[in-house]
Image (cartoon, rainbow, N blue to C red):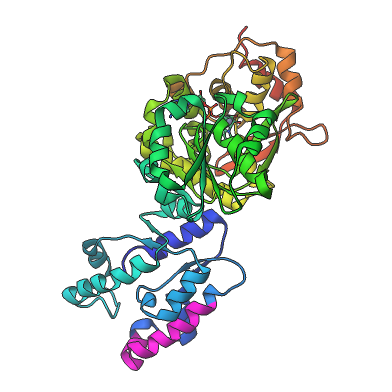
Amino acid sequence: MGAGKSTVGPEVAERVGRPFIDLDRDLEQDLGTTIPEFFEQRGEAEFRLQEERHAIAALRLPDPAVIALGGGAVQTSSIRGELRDRAFTVLLEVDPDTAWQRSAGGDRPLARDESEFRTLYERRRELYDEIADAHVYDADDIVLAAAGVHVHAGALELLGSLVPGQGEAALVCDPHVGGIHGAAAQVALGSRLVSVHEVPQGEAGKAATVAERLWSELRLDRGGTIVAVGGGSTTDVAGFVAATYLRGVTWVPVPTTLVGQAVGGKTAIDLPQGKNLVGAFHWPVRAVVDPATLETLAKDQYAEGMAEVVKTGLLAGEPYWELPGPELVRRCAAFKAAVCLRDPYDEGERVMLNLGHTFAHALEAAAEYEGVTHGRAVGLGLLAALRLSGRETGVVHDVLAPKPVRVDRERAWTALQRDKKARAGELRLVLLAEDGPVLEPRPEADVRAALDELIAK
Ligand SMILES: NC(=O)c1ccc[n+]([C@@H]2O[C@H](COP(=O)([O-])OP(=O)(O)OC[C@H]3O[C@@H](n4cnc5c(N)ncnc54)[C@H](O)[C@@H]3O)[C@@H](O)[C@H]2O)c1
Ligand SMILES: [Zn+2]
């Protein structure tokens, strides 16, 4: 009671693209009376029976929904059983003082006397803890919990308890990250850890030869879990191996870069013909994000990640780049997780995450992936995307200050025209409209002019 379920519930439903069911409101409609009146006339026991019928019907609906349960529903054991079997249950935390302030003076039958209210809070607490799959404070927390993304400073030390199940674990790291965070991961995994595998640092790790070596080194059975600690390169190759080894085993990325800490369930390796050309969608059983691991990241690596943070903030319409580290990580990860939950196989709106990337990839390709980092290219790409959207570019200059790159104009233009989002000769770009991102065609001449502006004279 008073935790904010009716406010946060619809917000979460919208963000994950599911319907919202407010059981108390539904129940009132069905009963043709308000809950306080029903309590008054028929008593709590009768109310709980009605509630049970409704809650179980809602939990058994064939299509998943976000459901707000009444505060007392967990007292009914059949509802608890149903939650255990069919639902991912989050407890929206609220302290008793706030809950009382919000509930007092209303018409809630069980919120009339403060000391009774507090006793009830204590009594229910145990049941809540028993059934909650996650404890959350806001909509972002709920989205992250639903996506299996655990964001928490110090999470690396708890890795053992955060890797679901009891099966064996194999750890994948590059030598650099392994040297810094590997020992903590090994200690945390304890006796479940059966092997440690090294992959080359950076993009070199995303090679078919590396995947092949991992396939042959691994000794996990189908119940095993691959745990990957490192940047996006390490988690990409380890995730791909997890998607393919024994036709797929579970995996847990522990991303240690700002880029990687927004988890999306895509895995990939590179081919000589291009980046990310082979891969699989393989959502991790859990992602463990420890913002504290970012502290050992080189400054330029952190700057790389800030380009993606600015991108995400622009998409969300919120200045995420102004937030302190851990909160920035949490908000960005939640934004991306929601987009990925709505479009898990990248068939629709997930394309928005490419804001600025059509230009960025063209610049990187023109530089043959040497001397132009992805972060700098994305900074420039965001400038172009904002200009073509008719928007201010101030924030990109202030936060990223991307300098024009020295690359061949023709090559950049040729690369841009090969963009995956091109359809029937028309260039479609992710742009930022007033109320959010859109995929729109733009005349070639305008696109070329915007690209030229990013290239040093
Ligand atoms: N699958 C996806 O959804 C997704 C999303 C974004 C990027 N990616 C991929 O990720 C790759 C880029 O990943 P990245 O930017 O994380 O870099 P990276 O994985 O290439 O790592 C860069 C360097 O940082 C080091 N490093 C990583 N974490 C560290 C830490 N905490 N402390 C000190 N050093 C650390 C690594 O050893 C490495 O040398 C690209 O291949 C990209 O395609 C994949
Ligand atoms: Zn990017």
Task: Find the magenta span and give its range.
Answer: 37-57
Q: Quadrant of the N terminus?
A: bottom left
Residue 41: give x, y in percent of width and height: 34, 93
Q: Is 428 displayed left or right of 86 in the figure?
A: right
Q: Residue at x 73, y 19 (%)?
A: 413
Residue 157: give x, y in percent of width and height: 36, 42
Q: Quadrant of the C terminus?
A: top right
Q: Is residue 51 magenta?
A: yes
Image position of 132 with respect to 418: above or below: below
Q: Is 55 displayed left or right of 322 in the figure?
A: right
Residue 171: give x, y in percent of width and height: 51, 39
Q: What secondary structure prevails in the magenta region?
A: helix
Q: Residue at x 63, y 29 (%)?
A: 206
Residue 323: tell me if it is visible: no
Image position of 331 with respect to 277: above or below: below
| Between 202 and 143, the one nearer to me in the picture | 202
Q: Is 118 displayed left or right of 338 in the figure?
A: left
| Between 386 and 267, the one nearer to me in the picture | 267
Q: Is residue 396 magenta?
A: no
Furthest toward the right, the residue is 424
Furthest toward the left, the residue is 115
Residue 245: give x, y in percent of width and height: 66, 44
Quarter of the rendering containing residue 99: bottom left
Q: Residue at x 57, y 54 (%)?
A: 223
Image position of 227 with respect to 364: above or below: below
| Between 425 and 444, the one nearer to me in the picture | 425
